[in-house]
């Protein structure tokens, strides 16, 4: 097979400038629709797995930041309301990874899209990310988004 002429070979050898980390998460929406369908044993397994997710998510976010080139960004995304899987993961990485900085998404994303999505204030200044919550007529969510830039 041949490479597309629009994709320079050199770009395949360089680290990416942008990474989307759609992290495995507890997926609150699926809990809503499957609650009680799998019995107590399935619920116990899901709760056990859920407790392990923040450690995995933190490792994945650190790896994504290590993989992106300096000046590049990582968007961390989940589909859960869980503070331990959202804000606490971002906070842990910001506190332990030198050379990265949080980027504000409110002006660029939340304000232009507020008529289509419901964003919940997260209570941090600056905010660690945006949380989209479902409401009647706006059924997207839950979804958490945070953008972190690698400085060096």
Image (cartoon, grey):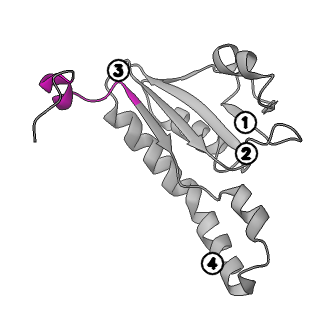
Where residue 72 sits in the image (x, y, percent)?
39, 22
The tag on residue 37 is none
Which residue: 64% across, 21% down? 105
Foreground mark, 2 or 3, reads: 2
Disc 1: which residue: 131
Foreground mark, 2 or 4, reads: 2
Disc 3: which residue: 152
* Mark pair 2, 4: CA separation: 22 Å
Q: Is residue 116 above or below residue 139?
A: above
Disc 4: which residue: 45
* Mark pair 2, 3: CA separation: 32 Å
**Mark closer to the chain start, 1 or 4:** 4
* Mark pair 1, 2: CA separation: 7 Å
* Mark pair 4, 3: CA separation: 40 Å
**Mark closer to the chain start, 2 or 3:** 2
Disc 2: which residue: 142
| Disc 1 to disc 2: CB gap under 8 Å | yes
Where residue 20 sits in the image (x, y, percent)?
46, 36
Which residue: 67% across, 50% down? 84
| Quadrant where the N terminus is found in the figure | top left
Relative to 147, 13 lies left or right? left
| Disc 4 to disc 3: CB gap under 8 Å | no
Give the residues in magenta: 7-18
């Amino acid at each position: 097979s041949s490479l597309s002429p629009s994709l320079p070979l050199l770009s395949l050898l360089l680290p990416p400038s942008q990474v989307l980390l759609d992290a495995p998460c507890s997926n609150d929406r699926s809990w809503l629709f499957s609650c009680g369908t799998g019995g107590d044993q399935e619920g116990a397994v899901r709760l056990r797995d859920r407790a392990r997710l923040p450690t995995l998510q933190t490792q994945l976010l650190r790896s994504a930041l290590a993989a992106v080139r300096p000046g590049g960004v990582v968007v961390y995304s989940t589909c859960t309301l869980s503070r331990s899987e959202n804000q606490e993961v971002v906070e842990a990485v910001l506190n332990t990874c030198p050379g990265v900085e949080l980027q504000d998404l409110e002006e660029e994303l939340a304000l232009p899209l507020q008529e289509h999505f419901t964003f919940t204030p997260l209570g941090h200044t600056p905010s660690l990310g945006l949380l989209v919550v479902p409401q009647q007529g706006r059924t997207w969510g839950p979804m958490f988004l945070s953008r972190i830039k690698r400085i060096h």
